[in-house]
Image (cartoon, rainbow, N blue to C red):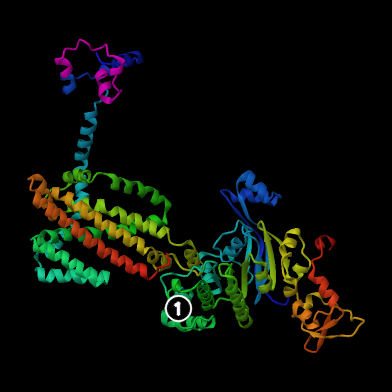
Amino acid sequence: MTDKTVKVSIRHLYKIFGSDPQAALTRVRDGMSKAELLDKTSHVLGLNDINVDMHEGRITVIMGLSGSGKSTLIRHLNRLIEPTAGEILVNGEDILSWNEQRLRKLRRESMSMVFQKFALLPHRTVLENAGMAMATRGKSRRDYEAEARKWLDRVGLSGQDDQYPHQLSGGMQQRVGIARALTSNADIMLMDEAFSALDPLIRTDMQDLLLELQEELHKTIVFITHDLDEALKLADHLVILKDGAVVQQGEPQEILLNPSDPYIEDFVADINRARVLRARSIMTDRPPQGEIAGDVAPTDNLESVIAQAEGALDRTYRVTRGDEALGYVGMADVMQALVRRPSGYTAS
Amino acid sequence: MATYDGLFDTLGLRDWCDTDASDGPMSMADLMARTQGGDEAGTTALRDLPFPSLDALHDACNAIPQTRDLTSGLETGFLGIRDALRVVVDPLTQPLSWALENTLWVMTETPWWIMIPLLLLATWAVGRSWKIVGFVAAILAGLAFVDHYEVAMQTLAIIFVCAFICVLFGVPIGIAMSRSDRLQNVVTPILDLLQTLPPFVYLIPLIFLFSVTEPKLYGIAVILYAIVPVVRLTNLGIRLVDADVIEAADAFGMTKSQKLFGVQIPLALPNIMAGVNQTIMMSLAMVVIASMVSAPGLGILVLRGIRNLELGVGLVAGLGIVVLAIALDRVTKASLARIDASQANR
């Protein structure tokens, strides 16, 4: 993770909604809480001292319940919302100091966005929608047609070029939204609850599509969601927001095993841990006393390990990548990992 | 002795009141009071206490003007600026006169066997529906059959010119309003005023400004009356464009003009067209009233029907206006439906 360069970096970001945000900002810096601020000054604390590094070619998932400020946060990255204080560095440059022209160039060429409600242009065809970013840059239809068609095909929308968005189902509309973001050829993709409006089966399809695309494209993706399953499935780096502040961030497996806060503990309580936790997260270095029953890959989830053990509890597996042994997983460890350690956050 | 004498006496304003105590022209009420013998004056019963209006106060104190001074003051004031106003407004509005004169001339002088097919062609171009074209053909033929062809053409000519100018000015005003809340706050009361002012009231200052023989006199009246809906609905239409779509346009780096012409106007088009439809309907309504100041067309016949109590003439012309209105409405609605069909997501 650390070997990857930081693409987007958020430093000490504050956003306060109200008539005099600067005055409210000093109070917040002096330690006033969100509820107190609302009560005393009727200012809403949207974001409170956010610090996040987003690495190149990785999916950073920002998760939180509604009202936690996650949609506000993602809109700061392309300055659809202006912050009250803080810095946003893209490729090391603070975009807050940029003028309108440079900002427009950033939005046109290096950041694309996918929206929860699709936000396609209803009076344009699917092809024209997919080519919207390039048309905005002044390219004619002839110039963007091939590129737009390529990405429409890639997201599974061949032959729908001349349909209008309202003729498509929700899932297909969001495919157009993704094709639109990909056609812009931006290396950063902002996805604001992109799959939340879709029904569960289609949502799973779209998540798989995104992972598949990411496999070959290696974009820097910032993904917003309120769904923990989705977050764990997609995230390379998970940021959990609550009341406008980061509660915990890190590798998703790490968060799942070591929740640092009762809030996160509640969050992860209903997760199917066998499906989410992977062998590499719970493996140990020391070789076991008994014999090795077989090999598993580090990315195998516990469900498949249990399946491989056929339910037997006394076996130990070796975790290997290629020929190299990374560690060992005993079935007892597996079983222990499946139940959540009560108040583990206080112990560690 | 007037009711409020005591008031001015106690306030010590008696001297001020009587300084220019010139006897103005006697009002009717004064005359009545004098002829009935002013015996009871001074002992006004409480139930007869007059409201302290300008007239009542004037009775007690000569320095206070009467109400009729207000209306006559307005009149002299308007007459005072009239010449200056005319110097500015006359040349500005002259193109309107030309447009009206020429359109009237073209539409009445062109032979009917060219004009009617042309109108039907326009109907097809706008509505793309043979049903509507047939409907319009039947209405035009019907009007021509009862020898109302020429007056109908005159009415249509006035409406075409006025509605075109309304759109020409109304849409940009509406767009400007949608982009600035301050402008909206200024323009909205003016629109309210234009919409609620009785149509006859427009004509009064206009008659003073222009000569009654000039077409622009009724042209301006029709435009002022009919421009309101297209302005309002353009403003509303643009403000109602889905905020998510606007956000997407911003996120992909559209400039303001790309957003306006590529997103906002196309998406507001159904509302703008609804405004155009309303504008045409209102200019048709105003055309009848404008006949009182020499606007030609069906309205003249309606007016004749009222003035000379010619029931039949008035009714036929009135029904002629109704069928014209229906035709215009159907044609503009058909074009509206055509726009809606391509974005039937609402």
Quadrant location of the C terminus of chain A in the rendered image? bottom right
Q: Is residue A293 above or below residue A255?
A: below
Residue A320: horizontal and vertical position, in percent?
80, 85
The amino acid sitting under disc 1 is Leu
Name the residue nearer the viewer: B194 or A233. Answer: A233
Residue B126: quadrant of the picture: bottom left
Is residue A29 rendered to the left or right of residue B265?
right
Q: Is residue B56 magenta?
A: yes
Residue at image position (7%, 48%) is B310
Q: In this view, does A227 lie above or below B33?
A: below
Q: Is residue A302 magenta?
A: no
Residue at image position (85%, 75%) is A332
Q: Which chain carries label 1?
A: A
Residue A331: horizontal and vertical position, in percent?
84, 77
Name the residue nearer the viewer: B172 or A85. Answer: B172
Q: Is mark 1 on a helix, strand or loop?
A: helix
Q: In this view, does A19 lie above or below A196?
A: above
The residue most toward the top is B39
Residue at image position (33%, 47%) is B192
Q: Name the residue under label 1.
A: A127
Res B220 seen here: no
Quadrant location of the N terminus of chain A in the rendered image? bottom right
Residue B208: horizontal and vertical position, in percent?
17, 43
Query: What segment is highlighted magenta in the picture?
Result: B32-61
The residue most toward the right is A289
Classify 10 Å Cα crowding around label 1: few (below 14), some (14-19), many (20 and above): many
